[in-house]
Image: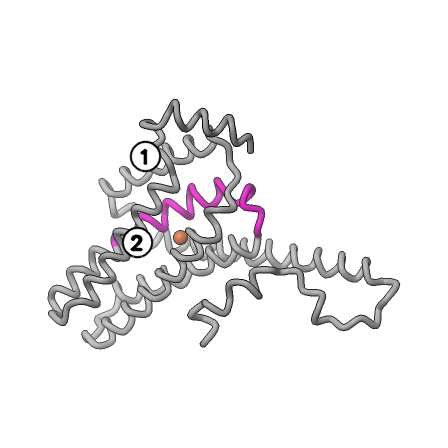
Amino acid sequence: MNESMNRKGRNSNAETMESTDPLSMLKEDHSNVKKLFDQFEGTDDEREQKQIATKALNELKVHAAIEEDIFYPGVSETVDDTELMSEATEEHHVVHFLIDELESQDLDHDTFHAKFIVLAENVRHHIKEEEGEMMPKIDSDEAEMKELGRRMAERKQELMENPEALSRKTSRSSTKRAAQSRQTSADQKTAKTSGRSASRSGSAKDGDSGGRSSTRKSSSKPSSPRASR
Ligand SMILES: [Fe+2]
């Protein structure tokens, strides 16, 4: 990425970028949904909790659809971290699963409450990784990001005006994309293993523990809530 060109572009289009910068859009969504989680946890009023949860689920569905349909495909190549992108997709899959259960089952309040708290924990973790690890790795140029932001804003508007368009479609597309990501990740791991085998062909007795190439496993996993499961 040409930094000086991007800086110049950002300055001259600051106002336009403000409304179409995809990262700002996503971070604003993240902030809104985290506030709703805090509100949910900050009240014992069951009716109020249900209202807050309904709002949070709707916002999450729109947000997830935009990420899955436009943002992830738009940045995955420049992020150049298949494991990170696959993990994000799998996390979306879990979120959709929980949303489906929260919406489609006639749950008693305690179960609804417990499921929503689990959803909130998962989404908070997901947001942390998306903002802390994925976003810094994006290396798209100014024009690509602007176009991405424009498409995301357009799609968001459509979904907010026509929420039925989300329904189960998002869930199915998430499942399909998660399966594709699993395959891509498996292919990449196979390629890495082949590469390691080839490079170690002259010293096959080396221990295997030092051969793992994923930095994500050592750097980010200990903080993951899933690490304790
Ligand atoms: Fe996400």
Q: Position of residue 61 (x, y in %)?
A: 31, 52
Left or right: 71 in relation to 104: right
Of pointers 1 and 2, the one earlier in the residue sequence? 2
**Residue that mark 1 sits on:** 154
Question: Which one is nearer the viewer's eye here, 177 or 85?
Answer: 85
The quadrant in which residue 91 appears is: bottom left
Q: Position of residue 185 (x, y in %)?
A: 60, 57
Q: Position of residue 124 (x, y in %)?
A: 35, 61
Near mark 2 (Cα within 10 A), the count class, few <14, some 14-19 or many ≥20, is: many
Residue positioned 38% across, 39% down in the render:
22
**Amino acid, disc 2:** Leu
Label drawn at residue 60: 2
Vertical comparison of 50 with 187: above or below: below
Q: Position of residue 45 (x, y in %)?
A: 11, 69
The region drawn magenta spans 58-81
The quadrant in which residue 128 appears is: bottom left
**Amino acid, disc 1:** Glu
Left or right: 89 in relation to 66: right
